[in-house]
Image: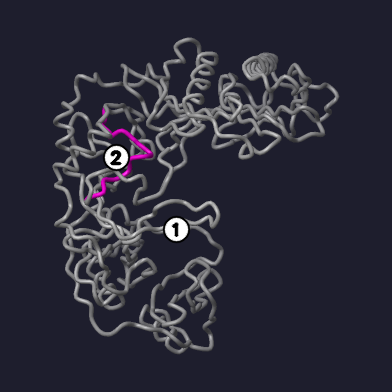
Amino acid sequence: MMKKLNKVIFSVTTATLLATTPIHLTNNGQVLAEESKAKELAPEWKEKVELAIQKVKEMLPYLADFSYSTLEILEKDYGRNRIKITLQTSKEKKKPSFRLYLDEQGNPNTFKYDEEFPEEERPKIEHDKVKSKATDFMKQWYGPDMGGFAYNPNYSQDNEAHFTKLVNGLPYLNINVRLTVNSKGEILSKGSGLHKYNLGDDAPALENMKFADPKEAISKDQAEKAFAKHLKLFYLKQPVERWDEKTKEYLYGSPTLRYKSEFSEFIDAKTGKEVPEYEGSGSAYNPIVRVNPVGKEVTVKTTEEAAAMFAAFGIESKAEKIKEGISEDTKGKEYIHEINKDFEAIIITEEETGRFMSYGMVDKKKKEREYPEEDPNGKKWLTPEESMKLAIAALEKYGPKHLKEVMPIGTAEFWQRGAEQGFKFVNVHEGIPVLDDEIYIRIDRITGEVISLRMTDVSWEPLILPDPKKAVSHEQALKEYLKVRPLELQYLTPDADILSDNPSYQPILVYRTAISLDHREIDALTGKFTTTGEIHYNPY
């Protein structure tokens, strides 16, 4: 779905810059003449390399004894050519090492220091010290004004400090710097940070971008009213409590009822409308759908029954052709039918009960499947609405018999990939979605057949969940949410623009609630924030 971003190429010729082998340097950055296969850098680039090494050595005292250097031209690295310099204390000793990358103008840009001894064996450093050390470094690197960057507390934690470019006094989320600091207060790495929104080397010069006047934004009160519509109740049947370092697994708690924002994070500060994350994406919640499960629970306990199940999904098979095994992902029993040299169909069941849980086709070569964007024969494909009816019919036939209502999550267009339509359904209790009680179904829009049906995360018995009548009011939850995580005015170039066929790369004014790693969602029964969230991911 994501397209490769266009990258800027060095403004020097291949003949004068590119090398087919690493170029070895002396301590001051000069290219060693005796390296017979090494190509000469243009004189101006030799000087830039020398100045870059000199700059990092002056700013990072731990590089004092790094007397051995190699230089490598990375051709078409992420779509562009760039220089990588590696510093070591000697040719033989590979650690510690220091990797430095130069930008398209030959200036030192990002770097990473690989220490000789593991960082985890040292005591932790307080984040206030991380912020202080990182701020001092930014002033050294960019000058007293830090190059127009400002410390961004929303994304900084532990030993990482993030700095975001300011425009008209507001953060522009697409241009950032991330610094990491070790327990000795040394700057370990410098990167672009906030990769989810980062334009990186594609960022046009700021003077070529159009930044709206902050005065054009709707009031904070108007923005809060727009945000309020997205703060909604949801259940988790198995909320994550914490990560267990010993077992390397999440530990789960009792079922919970919470409030959270179910939209894509940003509100257009001029219109008050949601800014979609990708083209076709948008608000997660959709109208509730009534379902009427039919028949008895479906089980598969033999290869003969598996062959009959494959036939129900349009795959002709015979018992003697089916392989039996154990699923690596679910640990359930699996039945495998080879369709051809590239694809196989798989049925997964609960090992002990034989309950049918999953069906799908898998590319044996693990390649990404390609989907036609339109019917080559000009045939009209099934609409999202028609596909939905077929998905619901499959859910009623194979899903849990206690389900009465489900909610599709996401938009039809977002789950649509050419001739394939995907749906994510979650269980609904008292009109409230249970976001981790889910079923995934994909429909072939040409044939109407079910391509895959995954029910490994759904509950097969009715859930006992908190009483929604005991929840605090929406008004109270909203007040607490915005008190702790107030709306902030910022600039953003949306991912949808960056990834489009004709990217505009223009920023817009947006409102976003302040990020907080310690305040994720509101516990609806207490009205206070939780420290864990429904989706466990790093928000950088």
Q: Residue 265 carries which label?
A: 2
Residue at 32 percent of width and 57 percent of height = 416
Asked if residue 109 lies left or right of residue 450, the reply is right
How far apart, in angstroms, are the residues tagged by discs 2 and 1? 30 Å
Image quadrant containing the C terminus: top left
Amino acid at the residue labelled 1: Glu
Spot occupied by residue 277 in the image (x, y as percentages of width and height): 32, 42
**For the residue labelled by badge 2, is the local secondary structure a helix, a strand or a loop?**
loop
Say whether residue 472 is magenta. Answer: no
Q: Mark 1 points at which residue?
A: 370
Looking at the image, is 519 positioned above or below residue 183? Answer: below
Residue lying farthest right?
Answer: 34
In-front residue for pair 17/194: 194
**In x, y percent, where is residue 372?**
39, 58
Region in magenta: 509-524
**In percent of the image, x 17 and y 63: which residue is there?**
430
Nearer the observer: mark 2 or 1; the answer is 2
Q: Which of 234 and 484 is in front in this view?
A: 484
Residue at position x 23%, y 81% in the image: 294
Q: Mark 1 falls on what kind of element?
A: loop
Residue 246 sits above or below residue 180 on the image:
below
Q: Choose between 260 and 201: the one closer to the eye.
A: 260
Label located before the other in sequence (2 or 1): 2
Q: Is there CB contact under 8 Å for labels 2 and 1?
A: no
Does residue 201 appear anywhere in the picture?
A: no
Q: Is residue 56 visible?
A: yes
**Residue 513 is one of the magenta-drawn residues:** yes
Label 1 Cα crowd, 10 Å radius (few <14 / some 14-19 / many 20+): few
